[in-house]
């Protein structure tokens, strides 16, 4: 029998994102805050289902899709960073391959 995870459900049920933002706003820079928020969102989408998942997803259509637009902006921003890092890794692999061949 699969054990049901209650923490993500509780997090959505008690409006945890508002509490987290208030608690950690002054402790992190914009970059860390973005990564933290994306990580939380990914885990919530992975572990929450039913009406709470619908509630979470409905946040992305409020205010003329404001949060969905922001999520797309973040995706493009980080996709570009990942592409640059992947290129660096490929260059390093090529150097190592030539060095040890």
Image: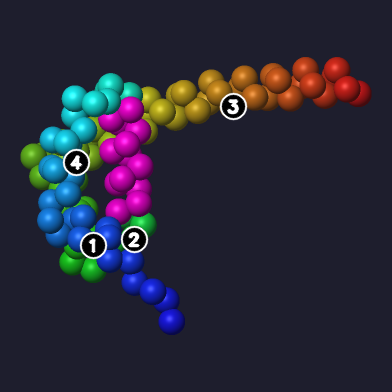
Q: Which residues make up the magenta segment?
A: 32-44
Rounded to the nearest whole Å, what is the CA distance between mark 2 and mark 3? 29 Å
Single out the residue that lies furthest toward the bottom.
1
Contact? badges 2 and 3 (CB < 8 Å): no
Rounded to the nearest whole Å, what is the CA distance between mark 1 and mark 4? 15 Å
The 10 Å Cα crowd at callout 4, few under 14, some 14 to 19, many 20 or more, is few
Q: Nearer the viewer, mark 1 or mark 4?
A: 4
Write down the residue under mark 4. 20
As displayed, is residue 96 above or below residue 8? above
Write down the residue under mark 3. 86
For image coordinates 23% across by 68% down, the residue present is 50
Contact? badges 1 and 3 (CB < 8 Å): no
Element type at marker 2?
Answer: helix
Write down the residue under mark 2. 47
Rounded to the nearest whole Å, what is the CA distance between mark 2 and mark 1? 8 Å
* Any part of residue 73 in sight: no
As displayed, is residue 21 above or below residue 60? above
Write down the residue under mark 1. 9
Front-most of 20 and 31?
20
Which is nearer the N-term, disc 4 or disc 2? 4
């Amino acid at each position: 029998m699969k054990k049901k995870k209650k923490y993500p459900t509780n997090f959505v049920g008690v409006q945890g994102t508002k509490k987290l933002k208030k608690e950690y706003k002054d402790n992190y820079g914009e970059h860390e805050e973005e990564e933290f928020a994306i990580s939380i969102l990914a885990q919530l989408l992975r572990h929450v289902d039913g009406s709470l998942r619908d509630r979470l997803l409905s946040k992305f259509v409020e205010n003329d899709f404001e949060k969905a637009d922001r999520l797309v902006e973040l995706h493009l921003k980080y996709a570009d960073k990942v592409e640059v890092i992947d290129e660096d890794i490929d260059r390093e692999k090529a150097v190592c391959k030539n060095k040890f061949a």
